[in-house]
Amino acid sequence: MALVGALLLVIVFAFVVIGSILIPEPASRYNDPGRALLYPSSEFPFGTDVIGRDLLARAVYGGQISLFIGVTAVLVQMFVGTMIGLVAGYLGGVVDSMLMRFAEAMLSIPQLFLALIALRIFSDPSQFPDFILFGRQFSSTMIVIVFVIGLTSWMRVSRIVRSVVLSIKEQEYITSARSIGARDTRIIFQHILPNCFAPIIVSATLGVAGAILLEAYLGFLGLGVRAPTPTWGNIMGEANTYINYWYYWFFPAVFIMLTTLGINFLGDGLRDAFDPRSLR
């Protein structure tokens, strides 16, 4: 299944990369109301949207943004969760109790609810204007969503890292490092952190799928990445009132499904590969 997952991801990345080579980015923003809601054809393989934009071009460039959000949000999530887990597990005592109680309090609040509140606060276009990078215009909400997803999903990573730290911090080589006067920071980053890489990699892999799905939820609710930047999620949100035009929502939904399935299959394979108790 890990090989199947890798194949699905190769298909998705090939679509996004090769599509961006063959289709210029302005095609995803060019609108012509005279060709609105056209069904798939040789000219427009995915059809057109309500204002006449090419849905194939929007799926290509929207896929880039969705994948970017998924990967960068997980980097934020892994950094915050790993640092908190290392500190809590290594220091223990009051620090451990306070950090873990805070993580449990965060876990008790639905992530989607936290994300909706944060986006309401930080997505004001007057405070966070759009920006231009490499000649392309991007919505500032893209960056907001990255940090919203990352800062509302670190809790499980921190608990996993903490459990690994608790199991190895009393090992003989850690005791030996302390006995020769090694500083705590050196012990944490040179001796303990490398032993946490396996669960961190597995959590990161599975976290990308969750981040892409959460972005899709927010886009479907109309609170995702603001126009003109397309994502798979906000394309489906636009299609919500045109549900009878099946092609409008079908293609971005298929790519979201392929991406999340591929990542989950690959994550399961990595988890089995890193599990020393698994049968080979």
Image (tube, grey):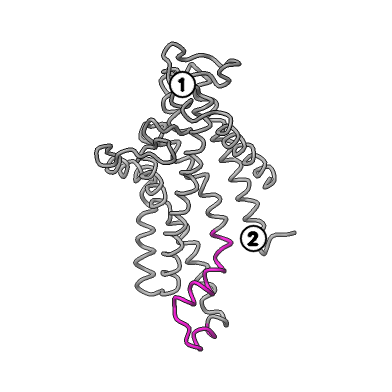
Q: Position of residue 119 (x, y in %)?
A: 32, 41
CA–CA distance in space, label 1 to label 2: 45 Å
Q: Which residue is mark 2?
A: 274
Q: Residues within 10 Å of mark 1 (few under 14, many from 20)?
A: many
Please name which of the two marks, 1 or 2, marks the residue nearer to the observer. 1
What element does badge 2 sit on? Answer: helix
- Residue 17 colored in magenta in the image: no
Q: Amino acid at mark 1?
A: Arg
State the image quarter where residue 99 is shown: bottom left
Task: Name the residue rendered at 41%, 20% in the picture.
Answer: 241
Q: Residue furthest left?
A: 126
Which residue is found at the position 63% from the left and 45% from the top? 265
Task: Please name whichever residue, 203 or 228, is drawn nearer the observer in this view of the structure.
Answer: 228
Q: Earlier in the sequence, mark 1 or mark 2?
A: 1
**Extreme residue toward the front, this view:** 135
Which x, y percent locates residue 64? 51, 38
On whether residue 176 falls in the magenta region, the answer is: yes
Q: Which residue is mark 1?
A: 53
Residue 114: x %, y % from top left = 34, 46
User: At label 2, which amino acid type do we have?
Assistant: Phe
Start-end of magenta stretch: 175-200
The answer to whether 188 appears left or right of 6 in the picture is left
